[in-house]
Image (spheres, grey):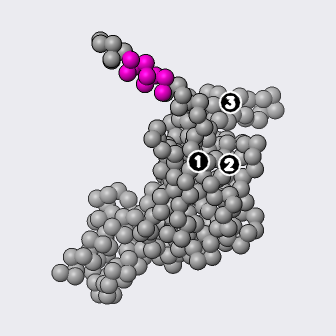
Amino acid sequence: MTQLDQFLQRAEALLARVEAILPQAAAREPDWNAAVAFRWRGATAQRPGYLQAVGHISQIGLSDLHNIGPQKEQIDQNTRQFVEGRPANNVLLTGARGTGKSSLIKACLNQYADRGLRLIEVDKDDLHDLQDIVELVAARPERFIVFCDDLSFEEGEGGYKALKVALDGSIAAQSDNVLIYATSNRRHLMPERLSDNSTYTHTEDGDLHPGETVEEKISLSERFGLWVTFYPFKQDDFLEIVAHWLRHFGCNDAQIAEARADALRWALQRSSRSGRVAWQFARDYAGKAQR
């Protein structure tokens, strides 16, 4: 190794040590008028994290979501309370895949965007930036839902602890204009193993108490004030959703009746009668019918 190479290596090491002790640049504010939805881009070595405006968002409405009436009512009520400045809860939406969890949150955004509701989508890997995001929007007049989609954790992931702190574990109070809405296929957000059962203990009076492993796994989901569970659709529910989307794509009643058998075969091939599968079938069928 030449003297020049040695010098460059030592210079790079020195710069890294200096950067580590320098204050981080503050996240820059976005153009709040550019969009109603934003995506958080996590910090890198070259720049701080920032909010990126989402120019084109899903136009799904609450009326497009069928056969999830109780869930829709709960989320709509909680969101309306939040938009109106009344007390509201952080929400965990769990259950079967493709049943409308994420779509319901997007529909609420479309319902209340003109009343000041905004949405910030945060990837699981960037959850450690939650406090920075809250500080960035805390003084804004809008109401912000921080949206974590398809959330689940493996043992030891850092985002798990960061989310716990953001929900209810920090010395700083959560901002009044921020709520966290998360969706997951797992009720407790972490994998549950058969070995966890061995940590339960019995008392003399017969009570059953979970051990530390189980307590840790359920402690995060318990910090959400509102739990909403979604269930797989029955066949008739699935066909009703198919019919709705076929009408949306311009099919008439005769075409909808004709499509029933094809829709059921489509669902059977995918081993799912979810709203997502119904929408995918409708797009395919309507597209072919319009030739």
Residue assigned mark 3? 211
Count neighbours of disc 3 (C-alpha within 10 A) and say few if under 14, some if 14 to 19, many if 20 or more.
Answer: some
The residue nearer to you, when weighing 97 against 160, is: 160
Which amino acid is tagged 1?
Answer: Ala
127 on left or right of 276: right
What's the distance in space between the residues labelled 2 and 1, CA to CA? 23 Å
Residue assigned mark 2? 167
Count neighbours of disc 2 (C-alpha within 10 A) and say few if under 14, some if 14 to 19, many if 20 or more.
Answer: many
Element class at badge 1:
loop
Q: Position of residue 131 (x, y in %)?
A: 64, 47
Name the image quarter holding residue 178: bottom right
Q: Magenta region: which residues?
A: 7-15
Query: Nearer the viewer's eye, disc 3 or disc 2?
Result: 2
Element class at badge 2:
helix
Question: Does the image show residue 164?
Answer: yes
Pointer 2 with pointer 1, Cβ within 8 A? no
What residue is drawn where x is 30% and y is 72%? 283
Residue assigned mark 1? 26
Question: Does the image show residue 187?
Answer: no
Which amino acid is tagged 3?
Answer: Gly
Pointer 3 with pointer 1, Cβ within 8 A? no
Pointer 3 with pointer 2, Cβ within 8 A? no
Farthest residue, direction right: 205
Query: Nearer the viewer's eye, disc 3 or disc 1?
Result: 1
263 on left or right of 230: left
Q: Quadrant of the C terminus?
A: bottom left
- The answer to if 9 sits in the magenta stretch is yes
